[in-house]
Image: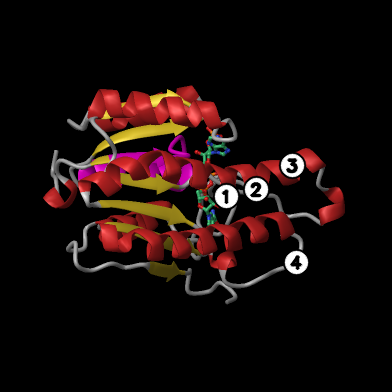
Amino acid sequence: MEQNRGLNGSKALITGASRGLGASLAVALAQAGASVALCARNGEQLSGVAASITDNGGKVFHRPVDVTDRQQILDFVEAAAAELGPADILVNNAGLGWYKPLLEYSYEEMDRVIDVNLRAAMVFSRAVLPHMVAAGRGKILNVASDLSRRVIPNMAPYVAAKHGIAGFSGSLLREVKDQGVQVLTLMPGIMDTWFGGPPGERDDTWAMNPDHVAELAVFMLTQPNHMMTDEVTVHPMYQEL
Ligand SMILES: NC(=O)c1ccc[n+]([C@@H]2O[C@H](COP(=O)([O-])OP(=O)(O)OC[C@H]3O[C@@H](n4cnc5c(N)ncnc54)[C@H](OP(=O)(O)O)[C@@H]3O)[C@@H](O)[C@H]2O)c1
């Protein structure tokens, strides 16, 4: 496998790795040399992503996890540490949202948007931090959104969750950076993933390819330890800002 050794020896947990940006991140981090622990609900899709990595010589642990279930998260973090060693990278990528007026949301859907996009990232971070702080190094990359910094109508729970994850990320960074832990925030605009419908339905001459955004994540994670790309925003050229 042709490897950039930038993450050689690292152990990375990636959430929402069954498809879309998470699958691209899994492959990109493995190509950069990391062992990767992957989770999402769809075990079949996860196995497919894992196979594409092991077929190229990478090391993978994967397990179906619903990130709205705290115990499943804690069990996954423990099992991944037992299999690969404790994580020194966590990528909180799992996310979902619907584009519709608030009055068309069920209460369950509102809860789910907050639980997947925000609460799960806090639980994962809380679970991996003891090792990172003890080791004096570690990187948490939170996949937020350009909607962490601006607002649009008809996505109110999602916009709230994405503003929340950016706030969590920035606050936690200031809490743990002097202990050697980086907390980085990636804020993409529109990508051609399964978010809101099958890929390819958007005009791919302007929606971003998730493989390209994953390369940016690898760049953020491979800076020298005394440097950090703490916030990165990336947009398709033709997206309204
Ligand atoms: N696409 C965009 O235009 C865009 C723009 C800005 C930010 N983002 C953010 O980018 C991240 C990745 O999204 P994407 O665009 O790649 O969308 P996607 O193709 O729909 O992928 C979302 C991932 O999240 C996982 N997920 C959803 N609910 C989950 C749950 N309860 N438990 C575990 N995993 C769960 C899905 O896996 P399972 O269904 O198998 O569980 C899937 O792997 C999200 O945080 C999203 O908010 C996307």
Q: Where is residue 67 shown, x and y percent of the image? A: 54, 35
Tell me the element at label 3. helix
The answer to whether marks 1 and 2 mark residues whose Cβ atoms lie closer than 8 Å is yes
Q: CA distance from mark 2 to mark 3?
A: 9 Å
Residue 228, above or below 10: below
Residue underneath mark 1? 118
Mark 2 Cα within 10 Å, few/some/many (few <14, many 20+)?
many
Q: Where is residue 65 shown, x and y percent of the image? A: 50, 28
Q: Where is residue 178 shown, x and y percent of the image? A: 28, 63
Q: Is residue 190 at least partly visible in the picture? A: no
Mark 1 Cα within 10 Å, few/some/many (few <14, many 20+)?
many
Q: CA distance from mark 1 to mark 3?
A: 14 Å
Q: CA distance from mark 3 to mark 4?
A: 17 Å
Residue underneath mark 3? 109
**Label 3 amino acid?**
Glu
Between circles 2 and 4, the one closer to the viewer is 2
Which numbered disc flags the more N-terminal residue, 2 or 3? 3
Residue underneath mark 2? 114
Find residue 180 and report its image quarter. Answer: bottom left
